[in-house]
Amino acid sequence: MSQEPEDVKPKLNLNIAFDGTQITVKVKANMKFAKIFEAAEKRFGKDPGMMMVVLASLLFQQLHVSAIGTLRFTYEGNRVQPTQTPAELEMEDGDQIDAFLQQFDL
Amino acid sequence: MHPRKRPAAEPILPVRDPKSPRLHKIDEAADQALSARWAKVGREFAYLVIDTAWSLALLTSMPALGSDRVSDSMSSATPTPRNESASEDVHFPEPRSNPLTYTPPSSSNTELPRDSDTPTAHDNAHDSTRTHTDLPTIEESPSPPQKHFEPSSAFASDPSGSNASSEGRYILSSPSRSAEQDSKEDALRAMESLRLDSSSNSLRSSQVSDTFTETSRDSRYSQRSSDRSSANPKSRNRRREHIYARVHDARVRRDRKELREEMAQELYELKRKQGYSSGYQDFKGLLDYQRRLNNLDHDHGLLPTRPFKFKRQLPQTDELDEAFLQRAIERAKATLSSPKPPKPYAPTFEQLLEFQRKRDEAIERRLRPPVPPLPTSLPPEDEQQVSQLLRKRGVISKFAREQVSDQDIARLQPGQWLNDEIINFYGAMILARSEASKENPGAKKQSSRGRKTPLNAHYFSSFFWTKLTEEGYEKGRLAKWTKKIDIFSKDVILIPVNHGNSHWTAAAINFRQKRIESYDSMNMAKERVFKALRRYVNDEHMNKKKKPFDFTGWTDWAPETTPQQENGYDCGVFTCQFLESLSRGEENFNFSQKDMRYLRRRMIWEIGNAKLRDDP
């Protein structure tokens, strides 16, 4: 990548919080969230304890779902769709995105 | 007593000596006077005893009846002298020669039939014998013929009165009268003689005095006229009492009284049916008064109540009463059978209760109109659409920032659990509707036929609760969730609550009603919800308004009437419907477990079309 886009489109440091742990991702403002979510899920998925939880919930539900789509990401209370970009949501440096596991009822 | 006084009494003895010639002309008058006085004393005593007994029996037990009889005796007493005088006038030419006896005017003769027609007249002869003392008072009454009595001395009026009883008896049966009157008076005479006997024999002294007067009278009659002396033995025989006469008399009187009582009771019952509300005693008083008014034609007028000393039970009042009662009963029955007049409205206690209940129900209906039951299925074309949506793959529907895939919507099929996608999608639609109605109030009114208008609501996604409980207000950065809104200006904040990833409930912060609300289809622990939300509201207020929130008047609200689920998988649907109803300000949820199948189909349609249905 050239240096010019860095100047024109500065990177944002976004915090992604999930179950008490927080990761920081450096993203471009016009980058689709799909890519960010994939990275986040990988990161969280590397945590063995977390994988256990995810797998346990998946097994318990007896549903085969891919890792993508298992987590829900919200920004300021609103759902963030993979097709959106940080620019659309007017995100600023240091903003936090919340990740949640899929919620079920009984 | 002083012994010297004794001789002084002896000179009186010859005067009372029974051996002295009684038939002597001069002594006869003295004897008569004496005997008459004795008779008077005896009778008065007898009447005093009878009156006392009657007054005691009647005045104590039934005062109304007692007063009734007083008036009767009063009314019957007045025509007495007339009848007596008339009978003397017709059948006794002889008394005319006597300057002391009364010669009645011819007008009294014409009056006689009318008097005898009235039931009161039959006892006149009897009255005349016993009302010697009453005579002065009777003479004061305004009828002209009685004025003639006044000049006559008490001595002269005495025998004429006592004669009338014996004379009237056979004179009344004379052929100058009509046969009808005869038969009537025969019966009356028989009764009268019984009464006379019973009254005269009630005391021995009076009996003795009676015989005294009779003998003296007899002697006088024999001197006066020969034809009358022939009748004397007859009258004497009649005077003798039949052995069962008194028993019979008592029985007749008792039966009469019972009959009268029965009739009065019957009439009373009839009147009660027509709405008479007072007691029986009052009713008897009323009857008496009516009867008195009714008899104004026959009597001289509505006379004031007699003084006590004249109160006497006159048997003829019974008959009058019976006839009167019979008429009254017939009248009452006729009134009952005829169409009733409009009665004044007097509601009973039950009616009042019913009225109150109905009014309360009407108010309740006005406040909370009954919600019609939900239909069992969508319209046919919509059902078809739902089936198509269920067959669709990939992303089914997008709304705002929410989207629903086929996997999510498949959860709306019966028996499946709902996930956050469905809940949040539904919540987003609720939020959008609320905002749309806020921006376009005209359309809102048009769209909400029969349903309550959407409130100014805010919807927090299902992650709000997770954040709030797991990280708290500060760490979870919940202040940023309301960057663009002021929750304190909203009517209601709707929050889906996920309990431990296993149960959905609906919570609400109701700023209009000042309530923290929790609607749980399993009716489980809600204290945690109340506690957490109260803390959130306070923290939010501190963050945005820089001062603690005033919880004065705020209550926790978890109504018992919340619809309950009957299985293990419908709580998500219940929660969605709670939130939807709450956003409309509806507090009476009109759905229950039986509506779940319909509501699931309906939610599929709503999510598929990204539009909340307005129809119930």
Image (cartoon, rainbow, N blue to C red):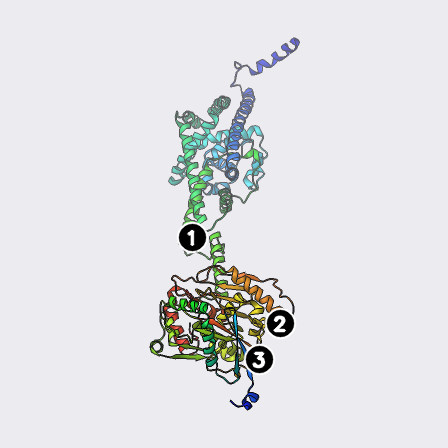
Write down the residue under mark 3.
A93
Write down the residue under mark 1.
B335
The Cα atoms of the two marked residues, 2 and 1, are separated by: 83 Å
Along the horizontal axis of the image, is B262 left or right of B457?
left
Does mark 1 fall on the same chain as mark 3?
Answer: no
Q: Secondary structure at mark 3?
A: loop
The answer to whether marks 3 and 2 mark residues whose Cβ atoms lie closer than 8 Å is no
Which marked residue is nearer to the observer: mark 3 or mark 1? 3
Q: Secondary structure at mark 1?
A: helix
Quarter of the image that includes the C terminus of chain B: bottom left
Horizontal and vertical percent position of residue B537: 58, 67
Q: Amino acid at mark 1?
A: Thr
Which marked residue is nearer to the observer: mark 2 or mark 1? 2
Q: Amino acid at mark 2?
A: Lys
Residue B116 in view (yes/no): no
Other-residue count near label 3 (Cα within 10 Å), few / some / many at <14 / 14–19 / ≥20: some
Along the horizontal axis of the image, is B390 left or right of B131?
left
Foreground of the two, B522 or B360 = B522
Q: Amino acid at mark 3?
A: Asp
Other-residue count near label 2 (Cα within 10 Å), few / some / many at <14 / 14–19 / ≥20: some
Write down the residue under mark 2.
B544
Horizontal and vertical percent position of residue B455: 52, 72
Residue B377 in view (yes/no): yes
Query: Residue at (43%, 41%) from the top-left corner?
Result: B322
